[in-house]
């Protein structure tokens, strides 16, 4: 696999933001991308309150995860309704799994 750089493909700097946004949207707004986005939201803790007693190093790590996820959200620009659905999907990802019941 060859990794592609937008900077190399887009010679005019004014086209770069639009192409980058299009790339983020094509990745995260398809069905599999939405599943990954919900998982990343849960993993980043973006919708969770920060821990009460956290040391600065751990706090920086938590803030960094949230900032990275916020970057993704800013690039895909979803509606309030979509954001609420994403938040609910992330919440469901954080719930413990229930044991499988056999009929």
Image (tube, rainbow, N blue to C red):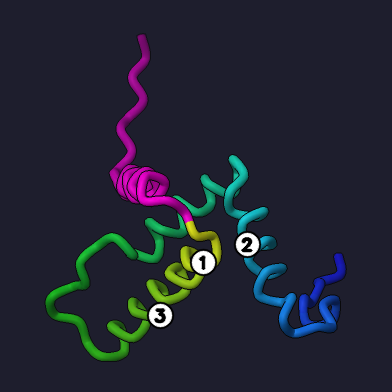
The image position of residue 27, as x and y in percent, is 65, 55
The image position of residue 52, as x and y in percent, is 13, 75
In front here: 32 or 57? 32
The image position of residue 28, as x and y in percent, is 58, 53
The image position of residue 69, as x and y in percent, is 45, 68
Q: Residue furthest bottom?
A: 56
Label 2, on which residue? 24
In front here: 47 or 51? 47
Task: Report which quarter residue 97 is drawn in.
Answer: top left
* Residue 95 badge: none
Residue 47 drawn in magenta: no
Magenta-tinted stretch: 78-103
Q: Secondary structure at mark 2?
A: helix
The number of numbered discs placed on residues in the rendered structure image is 3
Label 3, on which residue? 64
**39, above or below 48, in the image:** above
The CA distance from mark 2 to mark 1 is 7 Å
Mark 2 or mark 1: whose residue is earlier in sequence = 2
Mark 1 or mark 3: whose residue is earlier in sequence = 3
* Residue 72 badge: 1
Determine if residue 44 is in view.
yes
């Amino acid at each position: 696999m060859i990794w592609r750089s937008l900077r190399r493909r887009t010679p005019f700097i004014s086209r770069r933001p639009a192409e980058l946004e299009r790339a983020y949207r094509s990745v995260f707004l398809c069905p599999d991308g939405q599943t990954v986005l919900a998982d990343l939201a849960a993993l980043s803790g973006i919708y969770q309150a920060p821990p009460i007693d956290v040391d600065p190093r751990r706090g920086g790590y938590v803030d960094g995860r949230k900032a990275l996820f916020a970057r993704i959200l800013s690039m895909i620009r979803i509606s309030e309704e979509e954001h609420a659905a994403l938040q609910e999907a992330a919440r469901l990802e954080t719930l413990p799994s229930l044991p499988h019941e056999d009929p």
